[in-house]
Amino acid sequence: MRMRFRRTHGLALMLLLAGSAAIAQEPLTLQQAIQQALGQSPDAAVARADSEEAKANASLARTQLFPQMNFTEDMSRGNDPVYVFGAKLRQHQFTQADFAENALNRPLPIGNFATRFSGSWMAFDTFRTQKTIRSADLMRKSADSSAKAVNQKIVFDVVQAYQSVLYAERQIAVTQHEQETAAALMSSVQDRVKAGLAVESDLMSAQVNVAARKQELIAAQGGLELAWAQLRVAMGAPNLAETQLKAIEPRTFPATTLDEELTTAARTRPDLMALGQAQSAQAAAVSAAKLSFGPHVSAYGNWEEDRPSFGSSGGNNWVAGVQVGIDILPLGKRAQLARETAAKQRVDAQMASYQQNIRLQVSQAHIQRQTAQLSLETARAAMDQSAESLRILRNRYGAGLATMTDLLSAEDAQRQSQTNYWHAVYGNAVAYAQLLFATGTLTPDAAEVLQ
């Protein structure tokens, strides 16, 4: 019975360890990397903070519509004649004896405990407050749109860094294979030299070839470390351990026309939306500055209770009124209007410049995507041709019909064609991501097409 329990326990432990190993070896997908970056990137945190700040500013602007209420509890004591006279009146403690000359000129100290409620309300300010609220609301929308633009930039940075790691890993795989091939070739040449079928210069060339492949492997390993560093920065995860990534297979992405892409960018680019909303917000700020020259009507009120001591009884009074005012020397308001107008002109100029830059960015991304797709097709054909050429030259060298120089040149061409192919594979994916980013459609969900 004990032996059966041990066997069962051991089998369960093995299954648990195997399951844990399978989980640990699960590759990190591009979608997982993007989601982690959006949650941990400092740039995303800054954008969220900006959105919260703009939301708070919009709420703050609305508080101008509501009355302002205050409560104060005032405690004072003194013998100032005016203070004593007024305090006794407010406390309802004034008597005939207080009209005596000595009582008026040299009164005894008196204490006063005042409980006061006061309030005011701007009933009308020529609709300046409404314009200020609209400006704040538009700036809140602008901040939200800017946050979306930041998220798209984060997604693109992750895609680019993820592809860089995959390309670096392919480079290492290619260089390792070439190093093994170079070592095998050197061994074959050594045998041919011993048999008198090759000269010493062939062996020396083969040895130089092996050394060159080692240098390429060292450089590729350094490139992989750098690519991982870039991915950690893009994901906002400085302590991310190197793990297996899910490979992105070569594919052909859907094609669109330049006019369609420009139309999409004008409609969906979040940074363009943010600038447009900021432009409208500044226009509302200019209107608010103009309306500030108009008259304003406010209401106010005050209720107060005064007592000789904290727990005693006393008198209470109230005052209420309506105030109409206009600034007859609005120098500060004129300066404010000039500042808001200049800010509006600056935003208008930025919008015109930004629209031109977006058109250029979309055009560049469109050309780069077409170029990348054609480069991938060309690189695939060149890799197949170089592999066949190398096979033929190896056979010819084995038969003594080709020189070592010819063979090494063919190997260089084959190695370069493999490098060009994988560079084209990942360059094609990055170019498509660049196009999505330029048109404002590189959302986390849209990035799934790249995996």
Image: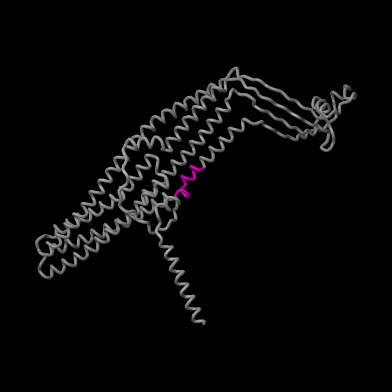
Q: Quadrant of residue 27?
A: bottom left
Q: How is the image coloured?
A: one colour
**Direction from residue 128 to residue 102 in the image, left or right:** right
Left or right: where does residue 4 sit relative to residue 114?
left
Q: State whether residue 217 is above or below residue 450.
A: below
Is residue 8 found left or right of 315 in the rendered image? left
**Residue at point 16% right, 64% down?**
203
- Report which quarter residue 150 is drawn in: top left
Looking at this view, name the residue that lies furthest to the top. 328
Q: Position of residue 282 (x, y in %)?
A: 49, 29
How many labels were placed on the picture? Answer: 0
Residue 25, percent across and down?
Answer: 40, 62
Q: Where does the image place residue 110, in percent across and percent down from the top left?
A: 83, 31
Instruction: Indicate whether residue 43 is drawn in magenta.
Output: yes
Note whether 433 is above or below 136 in the view shown.
below
In-front residue for pair 117/104? 117
Residue at x 90%, y 23% (from the top left corner): 96
* Image position, residue 39 (x, y; %): 48, 49
Please give the range of residues in magenta.
37-48
The secondary structure that most of the magenta stretch takes on is helix
Q: In the image, what residue occupies the spot 27% across and 46% down?
A: 373
38 within the magenta span: yes
Residue occupying image coordinates x 52% and y 27%: 285
